[in-house]
Image: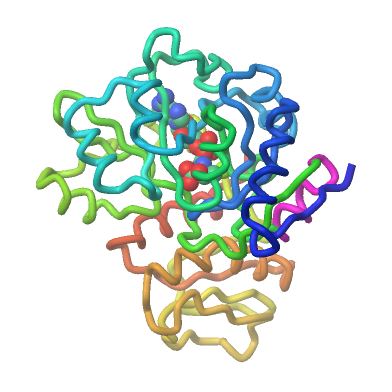
Amino acid sequence: MTAKIIHISDGFEEAVEAARVVLAKGLPVAIPTETVYGLAADATDPLAVGRIYETKGRPQFNPLICHMCDLGMAERYAHFDPISRHLAETFWPGPLTLILPLKADSGIHALATAGLDTVGLRVPKGFAASLIRAFGRPLAAPSANTSGRISPTHAQHVAEDLGEKLELIIDGDAAPVGVESTIVRVEDETIRLLRPGGISAEELEAATGRTIVRPASPSATIEAPGMLASHYAPTAPVRLDTREVRPGEALISFAGEPVSGEDRAAVILDLSPAGDLREAAANLFDYLKKADAATEVGIAVVPIPAHGLGEAINDRLSRAAAPRT
Ligand code: TXA
Ligand code: MG
């Protein structure tokens, strides 16, 4: 099987219908979202969800994010506390996932939630929301890549990685945010950040007037088992926070700042010459792939500011650089 690729600019409604037909057969379909490309399947169908794990080659059954077309649909599947509802009203559709108590008899299959009594919900923008509305059921959708690889931000990334295993890939051009959604859980009026992502902690704090609590250590976040240390791994070794590039290394830079040894780099990729962290997040995974293709020596990455989307960028970079498991 080699995936058919349909571009949404060739007919939005036709693309929605083609994807809906694949979902109705119980098969996964690769779709654009504003964060990264997702491998979407019917969250209520255990065989369909099983095919997501099979296609990604995921070693364990991690809980998957279930995508809804709007807040009204989400409220049919989970209980919202007032703070979670306020966050949903403020940031949906958009790159925010809320961990919420699952409603009894929600219909979301335990394979999608890994048997937990909570569920991660998100309302995506654009094509994905239209597809969910047309399909009428929630879509479980992790990133559309082989487990452990860099998340896809272009349809071409998906085609190269999973094209032989899929029936259909919907092409919606570059994913504008470029990193996965921010995951939070509200408990006892405390907002805990389980995964930094496309909405910054500063934005969450501004919207709620509350301090965002981070887990003591990333590994303490047993609730997010998808947050394995070695994730997003390029083939070449990755060195972070460096101002010096070694001969033959690929350089990932930021804001045009000078790096010693630049003339000996295999390639120089500036995440945002203007120093814009949003632009840097949008380019991150694509540039990691390009850097990986340009060198076998290694990838050197300059320090990236820690504020705003820099938190999500640094989180993904530290996983890319972590010792391989
Ligand atoms: O941007 C995104 O969120 C992308 C796009 C495709 O929407 N999706 C995505 O999904 O990243 P996924 O399934 O790979 O994210 C799963 C993450 C894992 O870290 C998982 O542990 C956490 O969400 N998660 C899901 N359900 C959870 C739950 N009930 N409790 C705690 N963490 C949960
Ligand atoms: Mg992923």
Q: Nearer the viewer, residue 86 or 281?
A: 86
Magenta stretch encompasses residue 24: no
Kindly identify the residue that appears in the image at 31 percent across and 62 percent down. 306
> Does residue 222 show up?
no
Q: Which residue occupies the extreme left position in the image?
A: 209
Count how many numbered circles sit on residues in the image: 0
> Does residue 196 show up?
yes
Kindly identify the residue that appears in the image at 51 percent across and 37 percent down. 133
Horizontal and vertical percent for residue 239? 53, 64
Horizontal and vertical percent for residue 77? 40, 21
Q: Which residue occupies the extreme top position in the image?
A: 105
Locate the C terminus by quadrant: top right
With 172 as the anchor, is 222 left or right in this view?
A: left
Asked which quadrant contains residue 44, the reply is top right
Locate the N terminus by quadrant: top right
Horizontal and vertical percent for residue 249? 65, 74
Q: Nearer the viewer, residue 121 or 310?
A: 121
Q: Is residue 148 above or below residue 33?
A: above
Asked which quadrant contains residue 72, the reply is top left
Horizontal and vertical percent for residue 104? 39, 8
Q: Is residue 142 above or below residue 12?
A: above
With 156 as the anchor, is 268 left or right in this view?
A: left
With 40 as the anchor, is 243 left or right in this view?
A: left
- Magenta span main SS: helix
Kindly identify the residue that appears in the image at 57 percent across and 76 percent down. 251
Q: Colour mode?
A: rainbow
Question: Which quadrant of the figure shows ligand 2?
Answer: top right
Kindly identify the residue that appears in the image at 80 percent across and 41 percent down. 167
Magenta stretch encompasses residue 161: yes
With 118 as the anchor, is 293 left or right in this view?
A: right
In the image, the segment drawn in magenta is: 156-166
